[in-house]
């Protein structure tokens, strides 16, 4: 009789090790120590306050350190641990993901809270739907923080102090920011933006982009976190070095920038035009808005006219360029009355004029045989001729178009205020008497790679027109402005920003 084969042993040491490791990878959230949660919340709050409002930029050098410490000092030893001398152990990958994910959710909620008011007040959404959109927005983008924590935990390999994890952290953070920019298309408030006022340091962005600044900030945060993770007798030098590096790198913020040259001058017309629904734009209101923009262009206030010149008076100061903002008013480029007014402004001031408008492509010239409307910026010569137009390429989802409209027609029922604009197809600069101007409309200024395309195509000056009246009194306007300023630093180009607020 042939003996029956023996069953595999269930007490093999290698099998036990794998089971043990699997349990460690996904220990329940309840095993996370309260101190780790407090550090995560502290990090989220610090990340919120480094951006406007309030914009305490100096705290960027310490904002991520609590999160790093939390990920490497998370849980109490359990029966599965051999070394009971370690008071707190690193997070498992699952725990690290949860901790960093919560940090990301809180940060986005505290920084992008204005999405709720914008969607409700101006987008026509009900309060519950607007709140739901903000919540889903935070849940989704918080995943990038979560991935950062997960990969960092894997790099640590379960060690209480991992040089490898701390060395990886700055590179990993930049990789996550790049993914957020290029995959989701929402690089709002990248970490390096917090140093936009620190011009000597921010100049490195001309070579590295804003991501280089994010790397430097994360590097200092990592050094500070490492100092707290080391034994007391070894941490003093590293802690001192980290703080000294932060102070030296931050010191550039208090260096006065050079004076502006007075060779050329531009007038930015920034009237506070209210955000009205389409039905509220009566003929009188339309004409009054156009009249106000014209009056400011022909009679510039003293402070603006004399800002870059000590000798010229407002009456004698000549402007080479006049920029009107992206306007909430329905100014169509094909409207003869609108064209006549803008052309007259150009002729009377002998200046080039840029104005926000709605560009139209007639059905006869459209491949879809439908009338197409674009969010556009037009360029008018000093002779009053309309010589160029840029159509916005990167539209705002749920603001200027509804994503997946054909696949999900029910999305149209959420709001009647969402626009139905078409995307432009070119990022070529417009020629203004030999000066090549790269035109950026509103939200496009937050995308580093897209603005660089204008410069790569020969733009000598960048002009951003925007309508930030949607944001009300929130910090979103200042957040947007800081990101626009960073594009000027990155590309080593003068940038003019005319905004309706």
Image (cartoon, grey):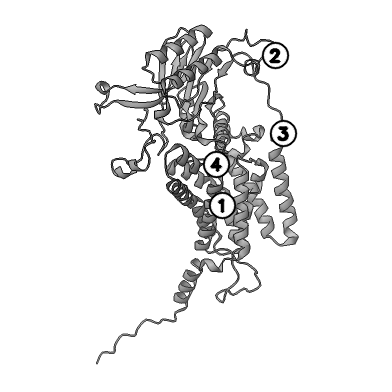
Disc sitting over residue 310 in the figure = 2
Q: Is residue 200 left or right of residue 278?
A: right
Residue 125 - label: none
Task: Find residue 143 and report its horizontal and vertical position in percent.
Answer: 47, 52
Q: Nearer the viewer, mark 1 or mark 4?
A: 4
Name the mark nearer the viewer: 2 or 3. 2
Q: Left or right: where does residue 252 sit relative to residue 380?
A: right
Q: Position of residue 26 (x, y in %)?
A: 48, 67
Q: Secondary structure at mark 3?
A: helix
Instruction: State the SS at label 1.
Output: helix
Q: Is residue 328 left or right of residue 372?
A: right
Query: What secondary structure is marked by label 4?
Result: loop
Q: Are marks 1 and 3 in contact (CB under 8 Å)?
A: no
The crowding category of the residue bearing disc 2, from other C-alpha atoms within 10 Å (few below 14, some 14 to 19, many at least 20), is few
Q: Name the N-terminal-most of marks 1 and 4.
A: 1
Q: Which residue is mark 3?
A: 254
Measured along the vertical axis of the image, is residue 481 above or below residue 428? Answer: below
> Which sits in the foreground, 59 or 358?
358
Bin the neighbour count of mark 1 within 10 Å (Cα to Cα): few under 14, some 14-19, many 20 and up: some
> Residue 190 — which label?
4
**Which residue carries the number 1 mark?**
168
């Amino acid at each position: 009789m042939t003996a029956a084969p023996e069953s595999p042993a269930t007490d093999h040491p290698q099998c036990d090790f794998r089971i043990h490791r699997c349990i460690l990878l996904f220990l329940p959230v309840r095993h996370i120590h309260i101190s780790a949660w407090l550090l995560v919340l502290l990090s989220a709050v610090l990340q919120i306050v480094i951006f406007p409002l309030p914009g305490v930029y100096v705290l960027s050098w310490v904002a991520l350190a609590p999160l790093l410490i939390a990920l490497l000092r998370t849980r109490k030893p359990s029966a599965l641990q051999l070394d009971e001398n370690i008071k707190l152990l690193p997070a498992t990958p699952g725990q690290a993901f949860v901790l960093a994910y919560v940090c990301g959710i809180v940060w986005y909620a505290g920084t992008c809270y204005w999405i709720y008011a914008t969607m409700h007040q101006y987008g026509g959404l009900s309060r519950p739907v607007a709140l739901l959109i903000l919540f889903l927005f935070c849940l989704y983008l918080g995943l990038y923080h979560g991935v950062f924590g997960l990969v960092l935990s894997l790099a640590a390999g379960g060690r209480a102090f991992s040089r490898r994890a701390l060395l990886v952290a700055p590179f990993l953070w930049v990789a996550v920011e790049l993914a957020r920019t290029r995959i989701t298309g929402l690089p709002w408030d990248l970490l390096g933006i917090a140093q936009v006022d620190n011009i000597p340091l921010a100049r490195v962005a001309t070579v590295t982009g804003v991501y280089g600044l994010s790397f430097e900030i994360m590097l200092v945060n990592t050094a500070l976190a490492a100092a707290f993770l080391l034994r007391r007798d070894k941490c003093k030098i590293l802690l001192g070095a980290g703080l000294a590096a932060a102070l030296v790198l931050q010191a550039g913020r208090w260096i006065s920038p050079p004076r502006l040259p007075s060779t050329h001058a531009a007038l930015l017309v920034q009237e506070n035009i209210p955000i009205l629904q389409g039905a509220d734009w009566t003929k009188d209101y339309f004409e009054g808005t156009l009249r106000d923009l014209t009056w400011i262009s022909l009679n510039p206030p003293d402070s603006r006219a004399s800002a870059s010149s000590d000798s010229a008076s407002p009456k004698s100061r000549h402007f080479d360029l006049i920029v009107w903002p992206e306007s909430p008013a329905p100014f169509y480029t094909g409207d003869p009355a609108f064209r006549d007014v803008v052309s007259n402004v150009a002729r009377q001031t002998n200046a080039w004029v840029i104005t926000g408008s709605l560009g139209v492509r007639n059905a006869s010239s459209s491949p879809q045989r439908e009338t197409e409307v674009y969010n556009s910026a037009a360029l008018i010569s000093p002779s009053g001729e309309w010589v160029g137009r840029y159509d916005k390429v990167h539209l705002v989802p749920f603001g200027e178009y509804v994503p997946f409209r054909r696949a999900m027609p029910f999305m149209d029922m959420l709001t009647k205020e969402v626009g139905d604009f078409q995307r432009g197809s070119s990022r070529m600069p417009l020629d203004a008497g030999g000066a090549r101007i790269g035109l950026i409309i509103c939200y496009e200024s937050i995308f580093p790679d897209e603005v660089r395309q204008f410069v790569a195509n020969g733009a000598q000056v960048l002009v951003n027109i925007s309508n930030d009246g949607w944001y009300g009194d929130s910090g979103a306007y200042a957040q947007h402005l800081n990101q626009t300023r960073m594009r000027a630093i990155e590309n080593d180009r003068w940038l003019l920003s005319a905004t309706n607020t």
